[in-house]
Amino acid sequence: MSSSPTITVFDDTCFLLHGLLSPPEQCSVFDYIQDLDRTPWSTLTRPMVPSPTTLTFASDLRTLPIPPSPTTPISSMIELVHSYILGSPPLGLDLPHFVSILSPPQPKSSTMSVIRYASPSGKFPPHIDHCPSLVYLLTLGCSAIFTVKTPSMPKTERVELKSGDVIVFDASTEAKVEHGVEGIVEGSCPKFMEERGEVLKSHRFGVQCRVRMV
């Protein structure tokens, strides 16, 4: 865990943990994803305008379940986020909306998907999810210019999500959290991540973990 992540609370449905994962933790997540990746990169058709690509896993799956055990770098990240939501001050945050969702007795399931964005033109248009779940969105590699707007916010906020940052939001229809990616910052990948994987020099990996209330 980063020694002192910076926390930005946009409102009770969305907050950012800047610098949540340490360099070794980021490398562990990237290695884990690389081991699972079955995307046929060498045979994919290259569009004239590069578009984000969702990684493919075994059995042509683009979304993977995250089992509670054994522990993986992804499940560890989820538990780390939960420690901020459910923990006692000063570690815990005053976020009753998230606490009410995550508190027992509701059972939960978690999934992971990964989208690869090329710099600088990788984009995802602003949209609202319609899934009763919480999303924990981790950035690896190059930074993303991310937009977020909730009904209580007077205007759209633009934030630079750097490698190791995690933004958390309520993805339900009722929360109406509009979010998107405006672009990827060229040359922004940390040196230690460049050394981990050549692809990270020019790409951002958006690791989306979705915790569903079922």
Image (spheres, grey):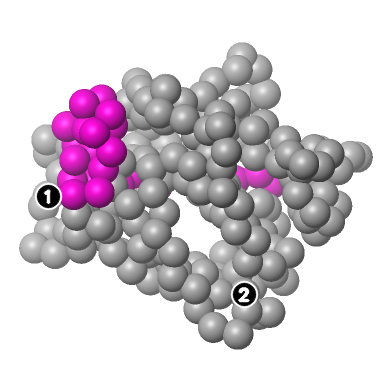
Residue identifier under label 2:
150
Left or right: 89 in relation to 117: right
- Report whether residue 131 is seen: no
- Give the mark, 1 or 2, whose residue is nearer the N terminus: 1
Compared to residue 148, the image places residue 74 above or below, namely: above
Mark drawn on residue 82: none
Counting other residues with Cα less than 10 Å from the Cα at mark 2, is it few (<14), some (14-19), or many (20 or more)? many
Q: Nearer the viewer, residue 151 or 213?
A: 151
* Count of marks placed on residues: 2
Q: Which mark's residue is nearer the viewer, 1 or 2?
A: 2
Residue identifier under label 1:
45
Q: Secondary structure at mark 1?
A: loop
Q: Position of residue 96 (x, y in %)?
A: 84, 56
Left or right: 202 in relation to 19: left
Q: Which residues are magenta?
A: 187-214
Q: Amino acid at mark 1?
A: Thr
Counting other residues with Cα less than 10 Å from the Cα at mark 1, is it few (<14), some (14-19), or many (20 or more)? few
Q: Residue at x 42, y 23 (%)?
A: 24
Q: Position of residue 102 (x, y in %)?
A: 80, 45
Q: Residue at x 85, y 52 (%)?
A: 100
Q: Is mark 1 in CB contact (under 8 Å) with mark 2? A: no
